[in-house]
Amino acid sequence: MWQLLHLHQHVLMASPLRSIGSRLSHWYCTCSSSKWVGGVSMVQGASRGIGLEFVKQLLEKSEKGHVIATCRNPNSATGLLDLKSKFDERLNILPLDLTIESTIEASAKSIGEQYGFLNLLINASGILSVPDILQPETTLNKIQRSSLLLAYEVNAVGPILVIKHMWPLLRAGGGSGTERDVAVVANLSARVASIGDNQLGGWHSYRASKAALNQLTKTVSVEFGRKKDPIVCLLLHPGTVDTDLSKPFQRNVPEGKLFTKRFSVQKLLSIINNAKKNDNGKFIAWDGQEIPW
């Protein structure tokens, strides 16, 4: 806001300032992209499951590029620590708890100081069930206020706060150092978040919280487009993946529809890597098909 006031007070200098700012921005991005060849990616919710697989494939599929992996307890994230031993110079592990905004701010500050920008943000964390705390509801009678609030906090509020604090870094990075023209925000959603596709009911907390994530992400994408920021927001459905999140509910999955983490993440990374400006705000399944809202 102070920048806007400053410019209002110095209208006659607006054109020179824009010219200088443009030259400085170009110089900064050129220097940064050459230093961090391959781009800088962040995976939030990276300690296990799909998030960990994203980190693994981002590191293994290319000899270039740097990855920031965040989770609540890095010291106990054995999968990440194993990857760190193999990719020490390219992997940075930071603590981040979606339910504590100060940890999100601290991560953004650390990333800004070390890298200066981001080209990719993947919000991979999600909550469906927690023993003795949260279970997918099968009837209205089983809905609890605490379950609804917890699902919203982790599945919707947290990811949007991460985007909020990483926004300046994504805007600074755009597609520099990558083969894309834009930075990408990829939020993991789910087909059950679709209101138009809801024919079965149930799972009230999970469905509603993921639908909230969809609406929040779509709204953010509109703002990014209006401000002409070099950022594309995607909502991605990974399919039913063999992870701890889905394990209690796998017996009803049709044959051939339970995907490995490797397969699902390969498909999602292909969508991310080929993202264009006109994909901003889309809700896309693992197979590239758009999902109705």
Image (spheres, helix red, strand yellow):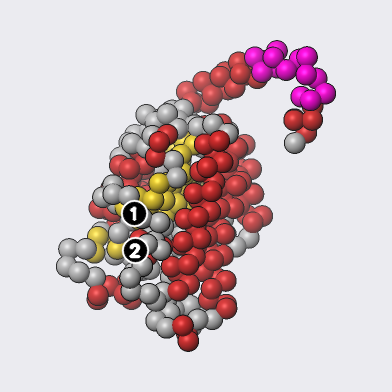
Q: Identify the amino acid type marked 2.
A: Asp
* Residue that carries the numbered disc 2 in the rendered image: 197
Horizontal and vertical percent for residue 67?
A: 45, 42
Please, which residue is most extreme toward the right here?
Answer: 9
Toward the left, the furthest residue is 255
Asked where in the image residue 200 lies, by quadrant, the reply is bottom left
Residue shown at the point (40%, 46%) measured from the top left: 282
Who's the residue at 29% across and 63% down the image? 240
Residue 32 drawn at (x, y percent): 53, 26
Is residue 78 found inside the magenta-colored segment of the image? no
Is residue 14 found inside the magenta-colored segment of the image? yes
> Which residue is found at the position 46% from the left and 27% from the top?
176
Considering the numbered disc 1 on the image, is that residue within a helix, a strand or a loop? loop
Q: Assess whether mark 2 and mark 1 are in contact (beta carbons under 8 angstroms).
A: yes
Q: Amino acid at mark 1?
A: Ile
Task: Find the magenta span and give its range.
Answer: 7-19
The correct choice, above or below, for 281 with respect to 75 in the image is above
Quarter containing the C terminus = bottom left
- The residue beneath circle 1 is 291
